[in-house]
């Protein structure tokens, strides 16, 4: 059973993954969208979608670095799956897009890269073994 789980962890992401789907803007702060913001993120209150291409978190900031919009969603087919965060900057704005391809990986401020997934899995298995001893 452990072997099958290890093999599955290393398979390419060809199956749909579950991603948080929400957006937040400071202009929307008084309503329930604040739960999408990193500071108040509540995964159990956020919509979850099945996504074929992976997940993303996109943050759009004005030229002073103030967040104008934060969006968690499915990665679109035209966007590249990098497994990490990529920043874009020009005179008018800056943006950061973090992509990942495992269930609910677009939660919170810190997104794990695809390369850290096997390590996270191994730590989980070891913790479970130690708790049984």
Image: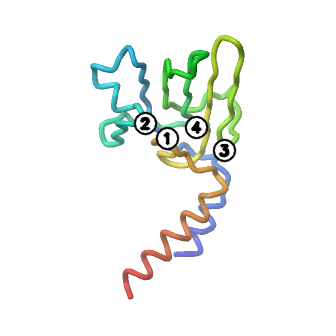
For marks 4 and 1, give the CA distance. 23 Å
Q: Nearer the viewer, residue 11 or 100?
A: 100
Instruction: Kindly identify which residue carries mark 1.
Output: 109
Secondary structure under tag 2 reads helix
Secondary structure under tag 3 reads loop
Q: How many marks?
A: 4
Question: Up-down: is 130 above or below 11?
Answer: below
Q: Position of residue 77 (x, y in %)?
A: 66, 28
**Callout 2 touching callout 4 (CB < 8 Å):** no
**Callout 4 touching callout 1 (CB < 8 Å):** no
* First of labels 3, 2 by sequence position: 2
Q: With 12 as the anchor, is 35 left or right in this view?
A: left
Instruction: Kindly identify which residue carries mark 4.
Output: 52
Q: Position of residue 44 (x, y in %)?
A: 31, 42
Instruction: Kindly identify which residue carries mark 3.
Output: 83
* First of labels 1, 3 by sequence position: 3
Secondary structure under tag 1 reads loop
Q: Position of residue 94 (x, y in %)?
A: 64, 21
- Say which of marks 3 and 2 sits in front: 2
């Amino acid at each position: 059973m452990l072997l099958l789980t290890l093999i599955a962890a290393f398979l390419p992401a060809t199956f749909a993954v579950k991603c948080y789907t929400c957006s937040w803007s400071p202009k929307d702060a008084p309503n329930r969208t604040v739960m999408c913001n990193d500071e108040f993120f509540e995964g159990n209150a956020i919509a979850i979608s099945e996504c074929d291409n992976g997940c993303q978190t996109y943050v759009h900031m004005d030229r002073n670095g103030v967040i104008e919009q934060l969006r968690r969603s499915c990665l679109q087919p035209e966007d590249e799956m990098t497994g990490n965060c990529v920043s874009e900057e020009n005179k008018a704005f800056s943006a950061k897009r973090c992509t990942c391809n495992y269930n609910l990986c677009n939660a919170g401020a810190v997104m794990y890269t695809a390369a850290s997934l096997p390590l996270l899995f191994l730590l989980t298995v070891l913790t479970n073994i130690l708790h049984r001893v």
